[in-house]
Amino acid sequence: MAFTRGLKLVAATAALLVATSISARAEAGWIVKSSAASVTETADRLVAAIENAGATVFARVDHAAGAKSIDADLADMTLVMFGNPKIGTPILQAAPSAGLDLPNRVLVWDDAGQTRVGYLDPAVLKQRHKVEGADAAFDVMAGALEKLTDAATN
């Protein structure tokens, strides 16, 4: 009987892993999505969505261009840093160490021919910095990141 329950648990776990690996999924605290567009086009869509939402793009880092500057090869990879003080400030007031992970960063990269978009799950940021309070800011951040990355990947 215990063996049967164990098999059911293994089967349920395997089904859950397969289901979560198909679309957006958490990997080591990341939310990862796929895009049918190129890295550049996906990053352009992300920047446009951020700006249309009224947030500020602080930086767009082309890691592949950096590698090329030292005659090294690197698959296309762009980091977009952005934020909105209305969302980030309450978090930073509650836990200044969260400034290590804010403003938000979204990485867009070529994964063996498939464009991926990934970002730190806000729940992980909250846990990592032991933020007490600022729950509303984390809820807004999670929703914004989901909408912005959906706009970039669809």
Image (cartoon, rainbow, N blue to C red):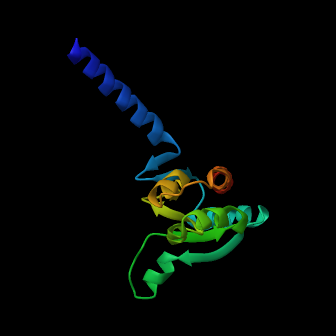
Residue 149 position within the rendered picture, expressed as x and y whole percent measured from the top left: 63, 55
Number of numbered labels in the structure image: 0
Q: Residue furthest bottom?
A: 70
Name the residue at 55% across, 77% down: 61
Vertical relation: 137 (above or below) 41: above
Name the residue at 38% across, 82% down: 72
Vertical relation: 118 (above or below) 40: above
Vertical relation: 128 (above or below) 85: above
Residue 111 lies in quadrant: bottom left
Q: Nearer the viewer, residue 93 or 9?
A: 93
Q: Is residue 68 visible?
A: yes
Residue 2 position within the rendered picture, expressed as x and y whole percent measured from the top left: 22, 16
Name the residue at 46% across, 39% down: 20
Q: Residue furthest top?
A: 1
Name the residue at 59% across, 67% down: 92
Q: Is residue 142 visible?
A: no
Q: Nearer the viewer, residue 44 or 129?
A: 129
Residue 8 position within the rendered picture, expressed as x and y whole percent measured from the top left: 32, 20
Vertical relation: 101 (above or below) 121: below
Instruction: Left or right? Give the position of 128 relative to 96.
Output: left
Instruction: Left or right? Give the position of 37 relative to 20.
Output: right
Please identify the quadrant where the N terminus is shown.
top left
Q: Nearer the viewer, residue 37 or 124?
A: 124
Residue 140 position within the rendered picture, expressed as x and y whole percent measured from the top left: 68, 52
